[in-house]
Image (cartoon, rainbow, N blue to C red):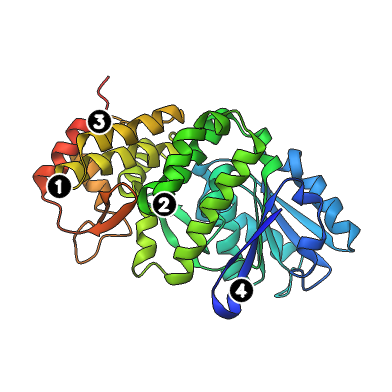
Amino acid sequence: MQTLTVGLSERSYPIHIGSGLLANAELLVAHLPTKRAAIVSNTTVAPLYLKRLQDTLQAIGVESVPIILPDGEVYKTADTLNLIYDALLIHRCERSTPLIALGGGVIGDMTGYAAATYLRGVPFIQIPTTLLSQVDSSVGGKTGINHPLGKNMIGAFYQPRVVLADISTLNTLSDKELSAGLAEVIKYGLIRDLPFLEWLEQNMDKLLARDTDALQYAVTRSCQNKAEVVALDERESGERALLNLGHTFGHAIESGMGYGVWLHGEGVAAGTVMAADLSQRMGWISEQDVARIRTLFQRAGLPVAGPALGIEIYLHLMGMDKKVEGGKMRFVLLKTIGHAVICADVPEDLLRQTLKACIKYD
């Protein structure tokens, strides 16, 4: 097991990364203020891991209230969020009752938002079970739900008390979900960690084969990068926005296709290739750099072109992005591979050229 720390003064917390952590009560006991906890999971993850976690809690005398939600991005809504509140109220959960998120990014985001708002704030613990949630969404305190007009438009910054990333839970992921997680892993190399990107190019086959050591290294290195950025800019007023490489395009894909049709990581992959293409048109990186980026995403089993929504629809949806400021779209682009910047002065003709070049027409 490896342990990292997200340094946020009195709200600092550990990230434990290793295999078999669900059975390790020692990692949780210090973060459970009462002998009662609510576990939020979904219909896919609960049959696999809920009993194991409940047994671990029971061994230290902690009673658990399971809250099982439907699975999928399409359910990341206010209606589903109310199912969590309903269960907490029915079971008379108190301000000291921690909420434990057991699942992927959707479960983590919704449970975190419920924890931030139920009784104006209750303890929150993240136990991510997908690669994407282990390397990205479980760390940093971004919580929330989707709105029909935009992804993650309603939410709060609310940090967990601890993150338990059990690598062994990745064994039950589908190949499609594993690949989706790799999109966020690749992102860290592109925006700030060139040596890690080179490692990924050398070890992609091991990651796809679910080599435990390779996966643990990738999760640890990704979390190190995320923790460093969050410690510097918790509420995304500056550097943290760089973590959104590819997300402006990617969120437009997810919204335009309907939530859940494309996985988040798939949208990020195609969106990152679009951002690379736009960076090249801005004169910052070369065509060879773009080809290198496209090849790595293809090797990871990810899409490298967006669906044919239509250029005007892309522009409209990107205009709804959270990063819009002063009416201007802000893009995370690459000055070089390994160094990202935020750019609000993208000529519209270049943006249209990128969209035309990077949309897959059937």
Q: Alpha-carbon neighbours of circle 1 within 10 Å: few (<14), some, or many (≥20)? A: some
Taking the image as drawn, is residue 304 in sight? yes
Q: How far apart are marks 2 and 1 (CA)?
A: 22 Å
Q: In which quarter of the image is residue 35?
A: bottom right
- Identify the residue shown where x is 56% and y is 34%: 207
Left or right side of 294 for 69: right
Q: Earlier in the sequence, mark 1 or mark 4?
A: 4
Numbered disc in front, either 2 or 3? 2
39 versus 300 height, above or below: below
On the image, numbered disc 2 is attached to which residue?
193
Q: Mark 2 Cα within 10 Å, few/some/many (few <14, many 20+)?
A: some
Mark 1: which amino acid?
Met
Q: Quadrant of residue 26?
A: bottom right
Q: Nearer the viewer, mark 3 or mark 4?
A: 3
Residue identifier under label 3? 359
> Disc 4 designates what residue?
121
Question: Earlier along the polypeptide chain: callout 2 or callout 1?
Answer: 2
Question: If you read the primary sequence from the N terminus, does the residue marked by circle 4 or circle 2 appear first?
Answer: 4
Identify residue for label 1.
282
* Amino acid found under the numbered disc labelled 3: Ile
User: What is the distance, in whole Å, between disc 3 and disc 4 at their CAs?
Assistant: 43 Å
